[in-house]
Image (spheres, rainbow, N blue to C red):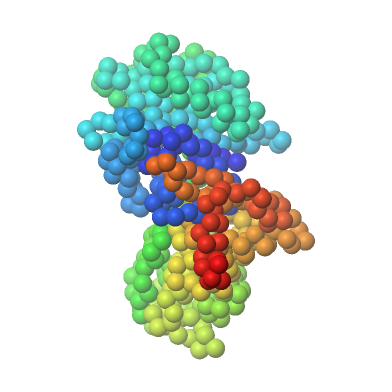
Amino acid sequence: MKYLFIDNFRGFSNAYIPIVDVNFLVGENSTGKTSVLGLLKLLSSPQFLFGQDFGDPDVNFGTFTDMVSAHSDDRSYFRVGVIQEEAVSKGKTTIRAALFSYREDSGLPRLTDFSYVSGPSERHLRFTDDGTLFSANPVNQSSSVESARKYLMPRWVNRHKSKDSSYSILDLPKELRQGPIPLILALGAVTQRLASKGKGSTHNGLQMVGPLPFEELVWVAPIRTKPRRTYDELRLEFSPDGLHTPYLIRRLLDPKAKSAPNFRRFMRKIGKASGLFESIDIRSFGLGDEVTAPFEVDAILDGKPLNLSTVGYGVSQSLPVLVELLARPRGSFFAIQQPEVHLHPRAQAALGDVLFEMATQEHKSFLVETHSDFTIDRFRMNYRGKVKPKIQSNILFFERRKKTNTVSAIKIGAQGNLPSRQPDGYRRFFLKEEMRVLGL
C-alpha cells in the first residue's frame, strides 16, 4: 500500500489517500478526483524533482491561488507527501516517504521545506531567501506504511510549521548560496556532504531520495481523438488522447512482430465479450512492407472489415484504452479517466474483466476515474473464481463535506464483496433514483 498526503490543496485538508493495486475513483463532479490523478502523475515523474513544476503537457494546476484550498482559513501554504513500502531483500521491506511544503512566490508555488527518509536517517531541507538549510537525524525505521502515516508524517508537518533551530547552512557553490535552488541540486549537495563524513552513500540525490510513489504513470485522457479514414504519418510517440493508437496497432499487427498473435487473440476476446467488434485489422495502401505507406484501421463486424470512422463511436473511443493496456510491459501503472465513455453497459462490464486480467496476470496497476457501476461490479465478480487473486483493490469515494473534499476508501474483499459500513453518500443517489422509478 501507498499513501498520498494532501493538505490545503484543491479543497483537501490533512487527507491521506490509500493507493493499492487497483483503485476506482468515484464521486460527483468537482470533488477532487481529477486533481488527485493529476497530482499523482506529477509526483510520479522524475522531472518533478528537477523543476517543481505543477504542470506538464497533460496536467496544469495553474497559479498558487488556483491550488491552495479556496475555503481554507490560512491560504498561505499547501503540502503534499507520499509514503510507500519497498522491498529491499527477500522478506524484508523498508519505508520511503517524502513531504513537500509550498508557499506563494510571484503567483507560483515555491518549495520552502522538504523532508524525506533515506536508509537509517531522515533528512530535512529548508529553502529561504538567505540560503539553503539542512538537517539530518537518525530515525527508527517505521515498521509499516500505517505507522509512517500515524507518526512520521504528522511529525514532519509540525516540523515544517515550526522555526526549528537545528538546521545548518548547506555548503553550496558561491553562486548558489543566495535564495532557493532546484531541489535536485540541493539533494546532490546533501549526498556529497554526508558521503564526505562517512554517513551516506555516493549515489546521486535522485537515487538516494526515491520519494516518487511509483514509476511514471501512463496517462489516458478522458476524451480520445476522433478516428480518421486513413493515416499517413510515421507517428510512434505516446499521446494521452490516443492519437498514436492507430500506428501502435499497425506495429503490433506487423506479421514479423511476435506481438501479432497475442494482439489478435486479445482483441477477439474483448471484442466478443463487449459486443464492440469481432477483431481489429489494418489495411495498407502501400506496396509490400513499406512502413510509411498510408493505411486504415478496420473493425471486423459480421465478417466484414469496416473503416473505423464508419462504425460506432464507442469502438474508436475504447481502442486507445484497450491497446495501451495490452502494449505496455508488465508492472506498468495506469491513470485512466472515464474509460466507459460512449460504451454500452455490456462493454463497460467487459472492461472490468480486462482490468482484472491485467492486474492479476500482468501485475499492472490502475487508477481508474469512472462513473460506471457496470465496470466496478464486473471487476468485483472476478474475485469469486477458483484461484484467489493476490491483488488489493478499493473504491475511493470522493465527496464534499463542509466545503472540504474528502476521500473514503471502500475495500473490495476477498470475495469481491464490499464492507457493510459504507459512506452514507456512496449509494444514496442510486437508491433515490431506484425509489423514484418504483414510485416510492
Query: Along the line of sight, which residue is nearer the eye, 173 or 411?
Result: 411
Residue 373 visible in the shown view: yes
Q: Quadrant of the C terminus?
A: bottom right
The answer to whether residue 170 is above or below residue 301 is above
Q: Position of residue 350 (x, y in %)?
A: 59, 69
Work out which residue is located at the far right of the displayed protein and give it.
Answer: 386
What residue is at 46 percent from the left and 61 percent from the top? 338
Q: Position of residue 408 (x, y in %)?
A: 54, 45
The answer to whether residue 186 is above or below residue 322 is above
Q: Position of residue 305 (x, y in %)?
A: 48, 86
Task: Answer with left or right where residue 231 lies relative to residue 5.
Answer: left
Corner quadrant of residue 160: top left
Q: Position of residue 424 (x, y in %)?
A: 55, 50
Task: Answer with left or right where residue 174 lies relative to residue 390.
Answer: left
Corner quadrant of residue 166: top left
Q: Quadrant of the N terminus?
A: top right
What residue is at 77 percent from the left and 61 percent from the top? 386
What residue is at 55 percent from the left and 16 percent from the top? 138
Work out which residue is located at the far front of the displayed protein and give it.
Answer: 440
